[in-house]
Amino acid sequence: MELFDAATYWHWWVLGVILVVLEVFSPGAFFLWMAISAGIVGLATLLVPGLGWEIQVLFFALFSVSSIVAWRLYLLKHPTPSDQPRLNRRGEQYIDRVFTLDQPVVNGRGKIKVDDTIWKIEGADCPSGTRIKVVGVDGVVLQVEKLRET
């Protein structure tokens, strides 16, 4: 623990720079908040030189966790707009598409072939040859509705 006893403000700032570098090479904004926390602890250590290493580590942990949780909560309320919101959500890409059943839907369950993949579907019972529309996704199961004949 003598290593930690010798920790000064610039050790925290170096840790902050290392975390910023890690942030550059990683997706999302995880290390950024830890880097900011390290900077804050470094500033606190500069202002209060006698701050014990246990308190420094405790502050770093508290600032890091609280800032990451606050950022996640902010993102839930203010999601980042995207021009392709269904990217990497394969099932959601099929919503509003219309297919013709090769096999009947029995007891609310069936299968359809979409491109080169067989998907499980859930919806009202209907015979093969019925035109259906994908209205939602529940995990790996497509939710479908029977299209009305016109």
Image (tube, rainbow, N blue to C red):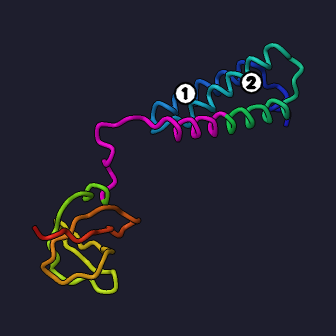
Side of 136 relative to 49 (left or right): left
In the rendered image, residue 124, in percent from the top left (x then y), is placed at: 30, 78
Which x, y percent locates residue 109?
32, 80
Q: Which mark is residue 41?
A: 2
Magenta run includes residue 100: no
Q: Residue at x 25, y 59 (%)?
A: 94
First reached walking from the N terminus: tag 2 or tag 1: 1
- Tell which residue pokes out farthest to the front in this image: 150
Q: Position of residue 7 (x, y in %)?
A: 79, 25
**Residue at 73%, 21% in the rendered image:** 42
Relative to 45, is 115 on the left or the right?
Answer: left
Q: Quadrant of residue 117?
A: bottom left
Front-most of 73 and 13? Answer: 73
- Position of residue 105 relative to residue 139, above or below, is below
Q: Amino acid at mark 2?
A: Val
Q: Residue furthest left?
A: 150
Q: Is residue 81 magenta?
A: yes
Residue at the image position 64 percent from the left and 23 percent from the top: 14
Picture quadrant of residue 6: top right
Q: Nearer the viewer, residue 102 or 61?
A: 102
Magenta stretch bounds: 67-90
| Whether label 2 touches label 1, CB < 8 Å | no
Image-quadrant location for residue 27: top left
Is residue 27 left or right of 140 when viewed as pictured?
A: right
Q: Nearer the viewer, residue 44 or 88?
A: 88
Q: Which mark is residue 20?
A: 1
Query: Relative to 57, does residue 138 appear above or below in the rendering?
Result: below
Amino acid carrying mark 1 in the image: Val
